[in-house]
Image (cartoon, rainbow, N blue to C red):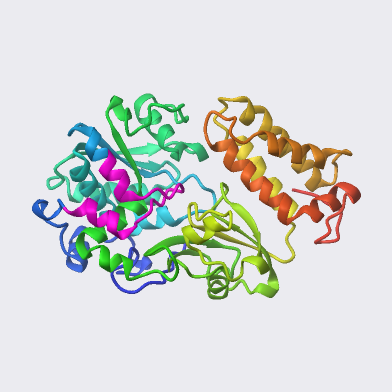
């Protein structure tokens, strides 16, 4: 994985080149200074609220509000769960951050624990992210005598849903990484039934910088409605330009495409926000600001910060079928909409992609996609059909051509999927 950065000094990925590997604690402190003293931390929650920092795990909930709510209800009995599961297949931003800047993540976790009254920190990192787990493990050892809370590293199992907040808590408690029905939410009854703040690693790292430099510093970045910067994972551009970037929120889809080597003339669509996100036509979205507020007004979501460009010669039906097959396979297997609904949509979409669909299959996919939202035991089926709905909107004629002719309208060849 190549980590590329686009930011001034004192951003998340500022500092040593990714080629040098994980930053040591001594170098981290020399570059950024120590975590503010305990007496100076009492204003952190108001500063986070003033900064407008949004959570970077996908939901985009305001971090300051989340910490304040936890602090008011926990009564000094909380636990912080640092979420670095990152099960999104095309996303690498959390892995890059944990691998290269582990002490920034740990700083944020310590600050969060102090702010909400937690005496324990659980660092939950994807089993498949070996470099990230190794880097964080070394960082924890470096600071073993200086971290006031009990801190432990837990390997999250491989799986898309393993990073969902309740699934992460469930795994730490029981060894089963499956989402649980709410209520109670993890903030009410989480790890060992104690109030648990589940926070994404990028959110914590930004909190650590805001603690040092203030909300005014954070708000000085950004180009549209939402202040600050964000890590994004870019795919589909030039091979040497794909990877993890830190951008000012508000940069447009087109500006990033140009920097990443995905010119409009050779790009037909873009997947925004990951597999819980949406396809967008490249022409219509070229001037779209990658800003959570702006995207929301267009019916889109920033999500996990994934920006995946689809080249002109690639079939949108095939790409969507592959994603839907993955999403059906990643179901927690706890409800009919996932077990039966997503599987039916995935299999039928694959038949369309392969040119083996029966008459009426496209109508079935459209009908099933409209029936699933709001009926699942967790948000997994909702996210999957959101992507499917966007695909039907953006690649509708292509889907119809596949069903009608058994051939791909983009490549001209007989439709097939490996």
Residue nearer the viewer, 273 or 309:
273
Rendered residue at 72%/33% (across/down): 344
Magenta residues (range): 43-69
Q: What x and y, as percent, mark residue 71?
A: 23, 39
Q: Is residue 310 left or right of residue 14?
A: right
Q: What x and y, as percent, mark residue 18?
A: 37, 66
Rendered residue at 30%/35% (across/down): 196
Name above or below for residue 50 compared with residue 175: below
Q: What x and y, as percent, mark residue 57?
A: 42, 48
Residue nearer the viewer, 318 or 64:
64
Res 318 visible:
no
- Number of numbered markers: 0
Res 52 visible:
yes
Asked if residue 123 is among those painted magenta in the image, a careful observer would answer no
Q: Determine which quarter of the picture holds residue 255.
A: bottom right
Asked if residue 58 is among those painted magenta in the image, a careful observer would answer yes
- Which residue is situated farthest in the left direction here? 39
Q: Is residue 260 left or right of residue 93?
A: right
Q: Is residue 175 left or right of residue 372?
A: left
Q: Is residue 127 left or right of residue 151?
A: right
Q: What x and y, as percent, mark residue 81?
A: 31, 39
Name above or below for residue 168 compared with residue 114: above
Rendered residue at 86%/38% (across/down): 360
């Amino acid at each position: 994985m190549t980590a590329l950065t686009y930011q001034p000094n004192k951003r998340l990925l500022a500092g040593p080149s990714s080629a040098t590997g994980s930053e040591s604690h001594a170098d981290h402190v020399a570059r950024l200074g120590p975590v503010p003293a305990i007496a100076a931390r009492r204003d952190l929650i108001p500063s986070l609220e003033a900064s407008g920092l949004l959570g970077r795990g996908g939901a985009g909930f305001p971090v300051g509000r989340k910490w304040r709510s936890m602090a008011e209800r926990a009564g000094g009995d909380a636990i912080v769960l640092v979420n670095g599961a990152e099960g999104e297949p095309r996303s690498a931003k959390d892995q890059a951050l944990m691998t290269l800047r582990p002490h920034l993540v740990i700083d944020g976790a310590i600050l969060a624990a102090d702010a909400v009254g937690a005496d324990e920190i659980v660092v939950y990192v994807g089993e498949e992210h070996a470099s990230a787990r190794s880097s964080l493990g070394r960082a924890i050892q470096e600071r073993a005598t200086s971290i006031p809370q009990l801190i432990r590293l837990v390997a999250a199992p491989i799986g898309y849903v393993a990073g969902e907040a309740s699934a992460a808590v469930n795994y730490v408690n029981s060894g089963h990484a499956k989402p649980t029905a709410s209520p109670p939410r993890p903030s009410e009854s989480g790890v060992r039934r104690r109030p648990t703040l589940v926070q994404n690693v990028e959110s914590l790292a930004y909190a650590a910088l805001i603690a040092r430099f203030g909300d005014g510093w954070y708000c000085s970045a950004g180009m549209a409605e939402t202040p600050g910067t964000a890590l994004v994972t870019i795919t589909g551009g030039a091979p040497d330009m794909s990877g993890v970037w830190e951008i000012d929120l508000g940069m447009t889809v087109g500006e990033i495409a140009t920097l990443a080597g995905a010119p409009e003339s050779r790009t037909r669509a873009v997947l925004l926000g990951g597999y819980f996100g949406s396809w967008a036509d490249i022409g219509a979205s070229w001037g779209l600001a990658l800003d959570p507020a702006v995207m929301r007004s267009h019916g889109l979501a920033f999500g996990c910060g994934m920006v995946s460009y689809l080249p002109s010669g690639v079939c949108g039906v095939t790409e969507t079928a592959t994603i839907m097959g993955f999403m059906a396979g990643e179901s927690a297997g706890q409800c009919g909409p996932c077990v039966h609904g997503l599987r039916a949509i995935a299999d039928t979409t694959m038949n369309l992609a392969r040119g083996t669909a029966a008459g009426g299959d496209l109508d079935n996919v459209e009908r099933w996609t409209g029936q699933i939202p709001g009926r699942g035991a967790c948000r997994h089926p909702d996210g999957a059909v959101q992507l499917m709905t966007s695909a039907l909107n953006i690649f509708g004629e292509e889907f119809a051509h596949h069903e009608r002719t058994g051939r791909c309208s983009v490549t001209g060849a007989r439709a097939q999927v490996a």
